């Protein structure tokens, strides 16, 4: 009886154990499903985090490969798409992005991890450039923006005011390097010999015309040491204005420049580029600022243009100074009256002719001072005029006997600005007035030429193969049907 009851009890216990096993199986199925769901969600979340980090890391790695010498010497950030080779190609950047992007998902490549398993199960990665901007796009605006950004932290308010005030005075006097030569030509026409002129009248008119056109010999009279002039040259056909350039994809520029960007860019040129009085080492041309102004292929040609323009400007400024100095005008009126009697040209015309010749002679002395590093008044008072009336008469010739009278007319200094200028100030104004396309492209020309001769792997450097802003699409695919696609824009500034 006892054994029989025991058997029944064992059967019941066995039945109860079976019921618990089915329940646990159902629970475990739900738990496993939940765990797999959590693992899958975690894998997706982890993939998203790794994806975002990989995108940022790839971009940072690529943008960390800027041209080091370009930054060290000229303080601008650009990625050289040629990577110091002779094959500039945006695909080089795309390849680098793909390599860095993939490495973030497969750190095991090149290593031997024991029992390694890829939790993310990444099967494919891809990066494609959709937009990029080259330094030369839109007439060099990307390069200009970096320069302005850099110089805005270095150029003070006083520096900006000093140059803008000088330009303001420049405009108020309508100073133009071509203006003086046009005045010379206009006045010289009044002294053209006619068939009615006597031999003496013809000689005097010819001397006056030569006197007015003193600029023909001005370069010789400057007193420069020609043996010390630089003979360096460049190929103008290889400059950015004349060669075929690469172009970026789409317009990525944001027009948010500071209104004083022109001043900043001028000061950048003056601080980074050499000139006649401040030459730099390891530069292709020695007179780089002069090249930026005139764009000629040799130092001598640029310097000759600089001297000629300096002379015309100084002569015009001295002509204005002489007209403001009424005592000087009154001193030469007797000369004009005597010439009128001899050659039958009205006294006001002969007086202006003498003033033009006097201004030209004064301009020669000013340019001599400027190219030796001295400063001269922008507009002179009577006491600051260097060429005396006696020297003027010697320049004019001995054909007319003139009694030198002392005029009792007070000097009028009304409206004469108390500004002195040097060679670098004229360069600044020339650069300030230069159209932006010439200013920016020629600055880039000089940087290209200098880097190519530096011997640091930049023999083929060119700005139209440099970028500082890109946009790319990053794609990741996995073995468990996860796919991430995103677009990222990145730049130095």
Image (tube, rainbow, N blue to C red):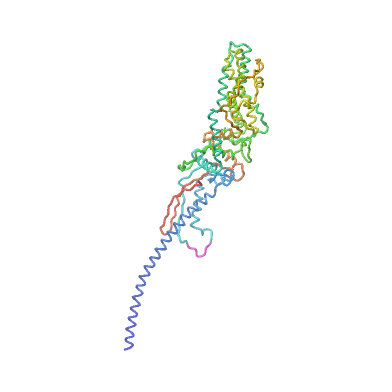
Tell me where residue 272 sits by quadrant.
Answer: top right
Residue at x 61% of width, y 45% of height = 456
Answer whether residue 115 is magenta in the image. Answer: yes
Identity of the residue drawn at 47% across and 57% down: 50
* Residue 336 image position (x, y, % from top left): 60, 16
Q: Is 240 included in the stretch rendered in magenta?
A: no
Q: State whether residue 464 is above or below residue 101.
A: above
> Could you say where residue 281 lies in the image, as x and y percent from the top left?
64, 40
Q: Quadrant of the N terminus?
A: bottom left
Rendered view: 202 above or below 411: above
Depth order, front residue of 51/324 = 324
Q: Main secondary structure of the magenta part?
A: loop
Which residue sits at x=48%, y=63%? 117
The picture places residue 372, in percent across and down from the top left corner, at 65, 32
Numbered range of the magenta stretch: 112-117
> How far across and down, in percent of the image, does residue 307 sit?
61, 30
Q: Residue at x 57, y 40 (%)?
A: 447
Q: Nearer the viewer, residue 53 or 376?
A: 376
Q: Nearer the viewer, residue 191 or 98?
A: 191
């Amino acid at each position: 009886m006892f054994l029989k009851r025991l058997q029944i009890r064992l059967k019941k216990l066995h039945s109860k154990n079976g019921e618990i096993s089915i329940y646990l199986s159902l629970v475990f199925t739900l738990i496993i499903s939940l765990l797999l769901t959590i693992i899958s969600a975690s894998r997706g979340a982890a993939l998203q985090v790794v994806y975002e980090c990989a995108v940022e890391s790839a971009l940072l790695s690529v943008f960390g490969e800027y041209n080091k010498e370009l930054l060290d010497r000229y303080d601008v950030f650009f990625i050289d798409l040629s990577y110091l080779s002779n094959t500039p190609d945006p695909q080089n950047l795309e390849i680098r992005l793909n390599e860095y992007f993939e490495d973030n998902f497969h750190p095991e490549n090149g290593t031997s991890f024991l029992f390694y398993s890829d939790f993310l199960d990444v099967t494919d990665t891809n990066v494609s450039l959709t937009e990029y901007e080259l330094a030369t796009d839109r007439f060099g605006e990307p390069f200009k923006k970096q320069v302005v950004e850099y110089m805005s932290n270095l150029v003070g308010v006083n520096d900006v005011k000093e140059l803008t005030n000088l330009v303001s005075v420049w405009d108020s006097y309508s100073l133009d390097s071509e203006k003086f030569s046009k005045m010379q030509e206009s006045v010289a026409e009044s002294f053209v010999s006619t068939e009615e002129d006597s031999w003496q009248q013809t000689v005097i008119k010819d001397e006056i015309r030569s006197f007015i056109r003193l600029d023909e010999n001005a370069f010789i009279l400057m007193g420069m040491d020609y043996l010390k002039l630089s003979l360096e040259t460049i190929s103008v056909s290889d400059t950015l204005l004349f060669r075929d350039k690469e172009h970026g994809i789409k317009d990525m520029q944001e027009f948010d420049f500071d209104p004083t960007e022109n001043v900043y860019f001028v000061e950048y040129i003056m601080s980074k580029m050499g000139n006649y009085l401040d030459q730099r080492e390891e530069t292709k041309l020695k007179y780089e600022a002069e090249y930026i102004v005139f764009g000629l292929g040799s130092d001598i040609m640029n310097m000759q243009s600089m001297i000629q323009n300096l002379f015309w400007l100084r002569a015009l400024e001295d002509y204005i100074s002489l007209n403001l100095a009424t005592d000087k005008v009154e001193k030469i009126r007797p000369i004009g009256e005597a010439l009128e009697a001899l050659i039958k040209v009205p006294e006001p015309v002969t007086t202006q002719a003498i003033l033009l010749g006097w201004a030209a002679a004064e301009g020669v002395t000013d340019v001599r001072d400027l190219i030796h590093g001295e400063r001269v008044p922008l507009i002179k008072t009577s006491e600051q005029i260097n060429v005396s009336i006696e020297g003027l008469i010697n320049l004019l010739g001995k054909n007319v006997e003139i009694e030198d009278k002392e005029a009792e007319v007070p000097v009028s200094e009304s409206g004469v600005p108390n500004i002195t200028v040097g060679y670098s100030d004229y360069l600044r104004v020339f650069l300030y007035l230069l159209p932006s396309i010439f200013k920016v492209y020629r600055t880039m020309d000089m940087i290209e030429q200098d880097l190519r001769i530096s011997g640091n792997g930049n023999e083929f450097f060119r700005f139209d193969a440099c970028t500082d802003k890109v946009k790319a699409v990053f794609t990741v695919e996995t073995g468990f049907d996860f796919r991430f696609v995103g677009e990222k824009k990145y730049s130095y500034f």
